[in-house]
Amino acid sequence: MLPKMTIELVIFQVLGISLGEVWKAPVHFLSLDQTEVLLYTKREEALLVQSSYKSNGPNRSYLSVYSKDPEVAQVVNVTRMSSEVTSFKINLLPKIAGETSLTIQLWDFVGGQEKLIEEIKDIQTKVIFKQETETVLKAQLDFDRYALMLILPMILLNKCAFGCKIEVETLQIAWKRPLPIILGAAIQFFVMPFCGFLFTRVLALSQAISFGFVMTCTCPGGSRGYLFALLLEGDITLAIVMTCTSTLLALIMMPLNSYIYSRMLGLHGLMNIPVSKIMTTLLFIVLPTSVGIIIKRKVPKWARYLEKIIKPFSFVLMYVKIYLSFRMGSVLAKTISLEVLFLGILVPVLGLLFGYSFSKMLMLPLPVCKTVAIEGGALNSFLALAIIQLSFPQPKADLASAAPFTVVMCSVFEMLLLILLYNAKKITVLNVENEKVKSFV
């Protein structure tokens, strides 16, 4: 009686299959940025599929896409896009609210005949028409627009006051010892964006949300950095100088990172990067601060009055931002998954850890270490929100906006928790020292 292994080997040889082919692992050529497709409007929407398959002839491979229920979502056409990596754009037309699934097949001509190279089944597709949600969102945006108009003078005045806090002599000293500024800029514009890109790929987030996280990670430090540096006993002047410097650098780095990572995420051709509007938004931050520096130089008496409003105005603006985040977040909550929440918690923590650990390795003073850490963790997420809303069409803009909203909410709560723990530690140390003094007496 022949052994079972021998019988199987004979069968494979009769079928013309070698033993190497039997044990060969399946090769996957198609890459889809999401396993679940959400469609919100009755307009055509695009789904991008990348292919690493190399055909024997140019442009011989093609993609077939089938919808299980065309009454819910219909496949309009599939377009081959030529770039560094072969990709296909699938245009879908939502029809009625419901669920269906897509089947994607990659074909090629081999020996004059069509051959199925790879097939992906059961790509869940949901059509959700959010007229009611959009009405609520529009009403909230109208309300928030009026609220922003009311606090706009406060924002401009606060940034002008920040400029008054900067001494020209301090700027000269900072440029003579630029290591903390260079370190902070490297973390904000190189380390953090790459980490954001890496983690979104590991968590297999959609292209829109991935871009939202990358843009949030590449933001300069916000005005909260000064307040947190004050409460955590960091270098306050350095915090203001770092925020101003990173905002100036962002005029170049944010459009550049937008371009680089949009291509790496496969969004090239599916979104518009409004470089001029990004620069206008950043200049809105830079110009009032520059006016404050001039006032400090020319009219010191006015500068002293403006410096007194920084702390109360910063508190008010921080709470207004939290309030607006909660209002907008209540609408975006349905799009926030556990993966998005996890990354929203992780991003500020990574910024703090990178800033503090790198500063310690370079043996910088403790207040400077704290300031660099805060600048890396307290990002200006509302700037990322503005860029996302300008870059994406709806509803992808709202979907991508979940990233900066999640980060800003988590960042504020984490920083407040850090401040509470820091002050609790100070009180504990002070009590211990008092007890030692009493026992000594």
Image (spheres, grey):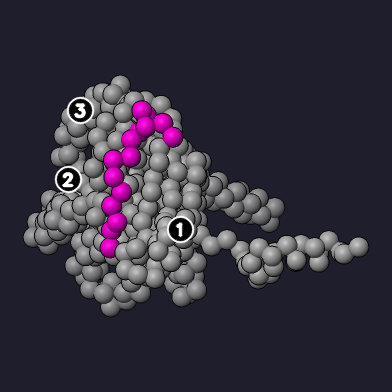
Is 237 contained in the magenta span?
A: no
Q: Looking at the picture, which amino acid does disc 3 mark?
A: Asp
In the picture, the quarter occupied by the C terminus is bottom right
Does the residue at mark 2 contact the one at mark 3 (Cβ under 8 Å)? Answer: no
Q: Is residue 121 visible from the viewing direction of this image?
A: yes
Looking at this view, is 16 or 328 the one in front? 16
Is residue 415 rendered to the left or right of residue 280? right
Q: Secondary structure at mark 1?
A: strand
Could you tell which of marks 2 and 3 lies nearer the N-terminus? 3
Q: Which of the pair 43/263 is nearer the observer?
A: 43
Q: Quadrant location of the N terminus? A: bottom right
Quarter of the figure with residue 74: top left
The residue that disc 1 covers is: 115
Kindly identify which numbered label has been placed on residue 142. 3
Spatial separation of the CA atoms under disc 3 and disc 1: 55 Å
From what the image shows, is residue 219 above or below residue 45? below
Locate residue 16, reporting x and y percent: 64, 67
Determine the CA span between mark 2 and mark 3: 24 Å
Furthest toward the bottom, the residue is 176
* Amino acid type, label 1: Lys
Prevailing SS of the magenta stretch: strand
- Numbered tag placed on residue 408 in the rendering: none
Magenta residues span 68-82
Q: Earlier in the sequence, mark 2 or mark 1?
A: 1
Q: Which residue is mark 2?
A: 157
Q: Quadrant of residue 406?
A: top left
Task: Please state which of the two labelled residues, at mark 2 or mark 1, is closer to the viewer.
Answer: 1
**Could you say which quadrant of the image residue 351 lies in?**
bottom left
Residue 388 or residue 370, whichever sits in front: 388
| Residue 295 percent location from the top left of the image | 11, 56
